[in-house]
Image (cartoon, rainbow, N blue to C red):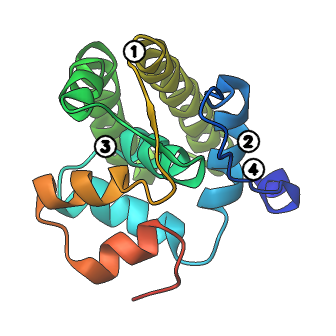
């Protein structure tokens, strides 16, 4: 993620016929994750609140693109996670358990493979997103809606948005 800091965030789009370009999602994730406090917020979301980081990043990306999900869109995106979560969750547990036994290079290989699984999960989310009708909305609050379903504390939600709150 060293190159993430050099990435710029996409400009907010306001044109009603414009859907976000899926190719922009991965660069957005790298850039956003590199912002101060976001990595820690993502780990807290995942470990303490049992949230999905890729879903949260997608929802925030949609917010920055001024695109709101349809009424049942969040649930449909959640359904798209089932297959990849079944791979990622046990893999993450295994990687963490093996960390003390591995040298840095071996551990990095495990992290790299986990990143591949994360990208697969993002593709599953983007595929499902392509099936949804987005609604242009200047003040889209997809991430806030997700935060309410998980009962996230407001400071954590703001930190996930990159607002440096802790």
Whether pointer 2 and pointer 4 mark residues with C-beta atoms closer than 8 Å, the reply is: yes
Mark in front: 1 vs 2: 1
Q: Residues within 10 Å of mark 1 (few under 14, many from 20)?
A: some
Lower sequence index among marks 2 and 4: 4
Q: Nearer the viewer, mark 2 or mark 4?
A: 4
x 30%, y 26%: residue: 77
Q: CA distance from mark 4 to mark 3?
A: 22 Å
Q: Nearer the viewer, residue 164 or 14?
A: 14
Q: Give the residue displayed 23% in from the left and 54% down from the top.
A: 145
Query: Where does label 1 land, which residue?
Result: 128
Secondary structure state at the residue bearing disc 4: loop
Within the image, what quadrant is residue 159 found in?
bottom left
Estimate how packed mark 3 is, as few (under 14), some (14 to 19) or many (20 or more) residues with alpha carbons within 10 Å.
some
Q: Earlier in the sequence, mark 1 or mark 2?
A: 2
What residue is disc 4 on?
Answer: 10
Q: Is 69 above or below relative to 21?
A: below
């Amino acid at each position: 993620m060293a190159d993430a800091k050099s990435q710029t965030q996409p400009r907010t789009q306001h044109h009603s016929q414009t859907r976000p370009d899926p190719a922009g999602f991965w660069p957005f994730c790298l850039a956003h994750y590199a912002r101060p406090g976001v990595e820690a917020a993502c780990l807290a979301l995942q470990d303490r609140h049992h949230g999905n980081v890729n879903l949260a990043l997608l929802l925030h990306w949609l917010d920055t693109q001024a695109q709101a999900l349809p009424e049942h869109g969040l649930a449909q995106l959640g359904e798209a996670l089932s297959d990849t979560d079944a791979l990622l969750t046990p893999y993450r547990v295994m990687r963490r358990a093996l960390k003390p036994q591995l040298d840095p290079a071996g551990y990095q290989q495990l992290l790299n493979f986990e990143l591949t699984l994360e990208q697969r999960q993002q593709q599953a989310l983007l595929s499902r997103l392509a099936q949804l009708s987005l609604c242009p909305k200047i003040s889209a609050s997809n991430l806030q809606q997700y935060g309410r379903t998980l009962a996230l504390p407001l400071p954590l939600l703001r930190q996930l948005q990159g607002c440096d709150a802790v």
